[in-house]
Amino acid sequence: MSTVRMTLSALAAALLSGCTATQVTPLQSASDHMCIEENPKVQVSDFVPVLQEGFARHGIETQLYAKIPREQCAYVVTYTARRSWDMAPYLSTAEIVILGPRRQTLAKANYHLRGKGGLSLMKWQGTKSKIDPVIDELLSGAQLSVAAPASSQADASDESRRSLDDELRELQKQNLGYEDYQRAYRKLLLEHQGSY
């Protein structure tokens, strides 16, 4: 009889707690400036602000674009987020992907409520409380290279900007491995930082 009670108690606890599944491939290295590609299909209104705030907490400045200006954005963040409904809508799944200069996947994070959260009251927690830990796991160990500040870029002369853009295009044409590309990219940014 006590075995049956223990089993029922364990089952009830599992139903009430729900199960959150996260799978994260952490970012190793990147720039401290990234572009977020807007996903108009996402109806979780506070997802992008939570995403931007989370990246800023790890020293990464982000800008949101409906259409990514590829020549200006070496690192791009894409995302999806879906809601489920149980008396009220709540975030049930999300994915964040960071793409590198050659559009290769550098890091990825998935958040998923198993069974849409079951009977757990935790499923109605806000986006921030659900996604902040995922962002922290995604970015906490990343080595960041410093890009020129946006304000400095805005004041840059057209000639300096054109020169950097040309050099970046040339760099992208080279058949470099990821690490070699990163080193060359950082070197270019440092060389041009003084001219901004």
Image (spheres, rainbow, N blue to C red):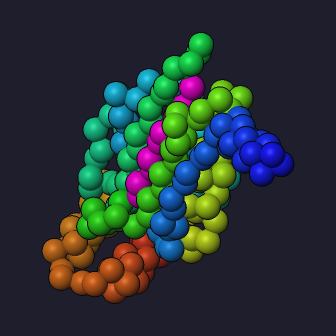
Instruction: Give the residue displayed 37% in from the left and 84% down from the top.
Output: 179
* Residue 155 place in picture, x, y as percent: 46, 50
Q: Could you tell whether 58 is left or right of 81 in the image?
A: right
Q: Quadrant of residue 5?
A: top right
* Residue 35 belongs to magenta span: no
* Residue 90 place in picture, x, y as percent: 57, 26
Q: Residue 153 versus residue 88: which sits nearer the camera?
A: 88
Q: Residue 42 versus residue 177: which sits nearer the camera?
A: 42
Q: Is residue 83 visible?
A: yes
Q: Quadrant of residue 46?
A: top right
6 up-or-down from 91: above or below: below
The kind of secondary structure the magenta stretch mainly shows is: strand
Q: Could you tell whether 125 is left or right of 99 in the image?
A: right
Q: How many marks?
A: 0
Instruction: Give the residue displayed 44% in from the left and 47% down from the top.
Output: 95
Farthest-out residue, top: 87
61 up-or-down from 31: above or below: above
Residues drawn in magenta: 90-98
